[in-house]
Image (cartoon, grey):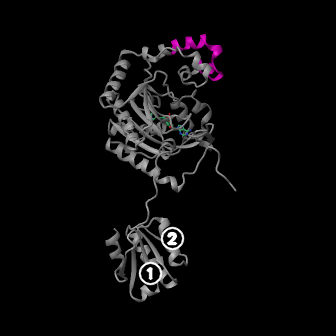
Amino acid sequence: MIQLIKGFKDILPEEIALWQHIEQTARALFESFGYREIRLPIVEKSELFARSIGDTTDIVEKEMYTFEDGKRGNVTLRPEATASVVRSYIQHRMSAEEPLRKLYTIGPMFRRERPQKGRYRQFYQIDAEVFGTASPLMDAQIIVMLVSLFNRLEVSDISAHINSLGCPVCRPDFQKALFTLLEEQKDRLCENCVRRSTKNPLRTLDCKVPSCREALKDAPSILDFLCDECKTHFETVKTLLTRQNIPFAVDKNLVRGLDYYTRTAFEILTTSLGAQNAVAGGGRYDGLVAALDGPPQPAIGFAIGFDRLAEIMAQTKTLSPQPPALYVAALGDACRELAWAFACDLSLSGIPTEMDFEDRSLKSHMKRADKFRAPHVLILGDNERENGVALLRNMSTKEQTALPLDGLVPQLINILG
Ligand code: HAM
């Protein structure tokens, strides 16, 4: 038997009601904030991700599915959506059309990470991006929208964590101070952090290795290094969130795993998923559009880990698929063909109808109808057919009504529609 590859998974029909519920709730909420959907390819030139996410990030260094595609050179299965959205925004000159662009996209991403619970090699993200405003009002609004989605989905075990990562003016001073500490503590750092200290020192703050945590417990706070503009921006975001009753915690060590961020960075954490505690993450990336040769436009966005969100919700919620409105129980060959035509017409008219084509007894049909949780059963046997009727049985009251076969479909639409 061929089995699926480790780190990949099937989302089975039993899980789909929950996935659809999440997706519909997100779409409705995002659209009421003016976001419009965009659908993008899964494969992009590798260079796009190297230049945006950053050459020295874990994602680009070791997690990308990259292959050579003839003359096109190296292409990569997208590890995230932001880079592709930015590429499309620049390519289609979206800023010329409307200075403020709010976009969302939902789909699969690919990272060759070590698979474990909540961490997959193909996973889904619900991603939102805004271009064209540097205002802290947008930072606060996008966090309000994100937290509200969790509230609407009745996911209570979450907390919002925020930080400011500064800008190209103030961050270098912080990096210098951090680098000095990293040099002093070199012997206590893991191999990965020693390497990061020169290439990407901020990432050391995120290291989970206990000796690194201990070595960096007195690390300087980036918040003490912010320039006046970044400081005011961050203060405004916090004030607006408080005013909107959004609880949050400031985490000076929140650095994110992608290099494009500036100023506000945020994550939604949960305690329901063990080690993989981030269910969403995002932030401002004011320099990325220009870095990818687009017009200098500020931007901000987030991505929700769809699989992780569905897993948290599945712990407390079961959503069953909608039952059909009608189960058709036909007895005997002649009746089955007649009933088959009724069932087709009802389904085509938008009445969810289920019919079993096998030769079964009435008792076994009733069992099937119960299994489908059908509230009504249409019974058509030779007796009924000879009398020119079919019986409509209400499964909860057990009441049966004889309906004339002539004009049966419109009558059923009237009763069940
Ligand atoms: P990220 O933090 O890399 O950010 O991913 C966002 C979310 O995707 C994570 O919080 C997590 O829930 C989920 N996720 C990431 N990797 C996996 C995995 N291997 N298995 C399951 N779920 C996973 C980004 O991707 C940025 N593009 C977010 C963003 C948008 N920033 C600005 N705009």
- Which residue, as the protein is rendered here, is positioned at the far bottom? 386
- Left or right: residue 353 versus residue 13 is left
Q: Are marks 1 and 2 in contact (CB under 8 Å)?
A: no
Q: CA distance from mark 1 to mark 2?
A: 16 Å
Q: Which mark is residue 94?
A: none
Determine the secondary structure under disc 2. helix
Majority SS type along the magenta span: helix
Tag 2: amino acid: Lys
| Image quarter hosting the N terminus | bottom right
Q: Is residue 405 above or below residue 255?
A: below
Q: Residues within 10 Å of mark 1 (few under 14, many from 20)?
A: many
Which stretch did the figure color magenta?
Answer: 175-197
**What's the amino acid at mark 1?**
Leu
Residue named by callout 2 = 367
Q: Which quarter of the rendering shows the C terminus?
A: bottom left
Q: Position of residue 253 (x, y in %)?
A: 49, 22
Residue 263 seen: no
Most foreground residue, 31 or 328: 328
Q: Residue furthest right?
A: 1
Is 24 on the left or on the right of 119, as rendered? Answer: left
Indicate yes or no whether the magenta region holds residue 189: yes
Q: Which residue is mark 1?
A: 380
SS of the residue under disc 1: strand
Residue 303: percent from left, percent from top: 46, 38
The residue sitting at 55% across, 19% down in the picture is 201
Q: Nearer the viewer, mark 1 or mark 2?
A: 2
Look at the image and tell me whether residue 273 can be seen: yes
At 64% from the left edge and 16% from the top edge, which residue is drawn?
188
